[in-house]
Image: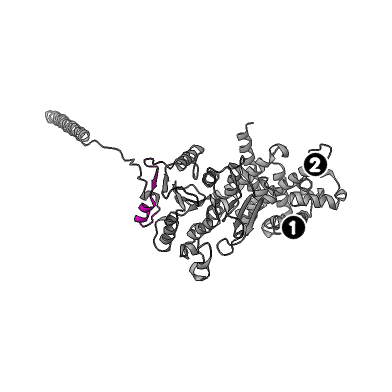
Amino acid sequence: MTSLQQRAELHRQIWAIANDVRGSVDGGDFKQYVLGALFYRFISENFASYIEAGDDSVKYADLDDSVITDDIKDDAVRTKGYFIYPSQLFSNVAAKANTNDRLNADLNSIFVAIESSAYGYPSEPDIKGLFADFDTTSNRLGNTVKDKNSRLAAVLKGVEGLKLGNFDEHQIDLFGDAYEFLISNYAANAGKSGGEFFTPQHVSKLIAQLAMHGQKQVNKIYDPAAGSGSLLLQAKKHFDNHIIEDGFFGQEINHTTFNLARMNMFLHNINYDKFNIKLGNTLLAPEFKDDKPFDAIVSNPPYSVKWIGSDDPTLINDDRFAPAGVLAPKSKADFAFVLHALNYLSSRGRAAIVCFPGIFYRGGAEQKIRQYLVDNNYVETVISLAPNLFFGTTIAVNILVLSKHKTDTSVQFIDASGLFKKDTNNNVLTDEQIAQIMVLFDSKANTDHLAKSVTAEAVAANDYNLSVSSYVEAKDTREIVNITELNAELKKTVARIDQLRTDIDAIVAEIEGGEVQA
């Protein structure tokens, strides 16, 4: 079986579990249980592998809890960020799941114990609340304890049966892939509510490459609207052969999605000391503002979300918004996220931000913010993408690339609206198309119907309009018609029609003559 076949089979199994278990459970709720069980299995196997340290004579799952000393526990928490006793491992709980009439209570106790193991340690904020959405007592699982246990057992046994190979060899990638598959399918089938927290991998790949273009080493990577962490993880994949000094940072306002992001970090083998995801409102209660700026920022913030804006008079004095002299409109916070990202960007870095197209041509406060960005030479590139690339919306969005180290004052515009491959439900960007965009971005060369670099003066003269269509002429796909040839064809056609009419008249006359003789 090829790797693609293995992956396809794994995906089929995961989706089957989700559907089998779901029953009457709402899609958003059932997702949490399957994801939670997958995460529980991952950290159990990860922890067991750490304790065993490659010694085939040691099988952690078979040990008695009583042999664990305080020193062993302390050392493990300092290294891994959490502790799991042998009896608490996924494999041991899943093995007895079908016959355990206290399964829901036992699971709850185990999850509390795992989170509590980090109390007082540096990993506490990264571990706390990870299992909050795996509610084993919820009536959504059933009205009776028996019903709850039955459904929980089905989840555990289903995840237990997933063929994820030997942990030390392949399992990290497979776990991460399985996780991303599940949340991407949920996003694809849950409309806007799902798409809010997941940026498709192909788009994430483009954004990550734009943000880190030309850099061999970055201090840290940041997403101010982290969602499930998919953008940060694409940055990791793109930067596997590069040095990331301080790791991955992000902030997310939704508690459930915040948990997804932290789980996602662990599932991709990013240890607790290499990521820092915070819960909270990025615009009103920003984290990391006292840290050193970020060399790479990636973001797909919510489109046209409402915020308090000018109703809070203190915000105009905020270091993030004050330089522009105006706040983003209360009904459209898009530029508030852009200015936030710019403020957090280092002098050597780039920010690549997915934006709603309207912010690039509307007047009022948004025009004034565009003027600030252009006049201060922060706008490197604006890229228009194809429609229907994202879950939950068909909008053809733009990517805004900001830089504080530009060597000239021109603004580049790239029309990538024609670069896509039709898929079942959504369009996708292929690796070849991403590479094509990156070549255009790197060269800054003018290319008919694709890319154009425009002086800041020209942008200013155009009322600081940053719409790609205002600068890159669209390719005329209409068929060219030769009027002379068309007229000649028409004459031939008319002549043929006249001849046919003459022939028909002759036939009719012949028939009518025959009828008279008869």
- Front residue of 403/227: it is 403
Q: CA distance from mark 1 to mark 2?
A: 36 Å
- Front residue of 98/211: it is 211
Mark 1 or 2, nearer chain start? 2
* Residue 413 place in picture, x, y as percent: 41, 47
Q: Is disc 2 placed on a helix, strand or loop?
A: helix
Direction from residue 320 to residue 13 in the image, left or right: right
Q: Quadrant of residue 242?
A: top right
> Residue, x 72% and y 47% (percent of image)?
43
For badge 1, the amino acid type reads Val
Q: Which residue is mark 2?
A: 52
Residue 34 appears in the picture as rendered = no
Colour mode? one colour
- Front residue of 65/127: it is 127
Is disc 1 surrounded by few (<14), some (14 to 19) or many (20+) residues within 10 Å? some
Which numbered mark, 1 or 2, is in the foreground of this view? 2
* Residue 1 place in picture, x, y as percent: 64, 31
* Residue 449 place in picture, x, y as percent: 37, 42
For badge 2, the amino acid type reads Glu
* Residues drawn in magenta: 445-465
Q: Are marks 1 and 2 in contact (CB under 8 Å)?
A: no
Residue at the extreme right of the image, as rendered: 66
| Residue 454 highlighted magenta (yes or no) | yes
Residue at the extreme front of the image, as rendered: 407
- Give the vertical position of 466 relative to 436 (above or below): below
| Residue 184 highlighted magenta (yes or no) | no
Q: Which residue is mark 1?
A: 145
* Residue 373 place in picture, x, y as percent: 45, 56
Q: Which mark is residue 22?
A: none
Indicate the quadrant containing the C terminus: top left, top right, bottom left or bottom right.
top left
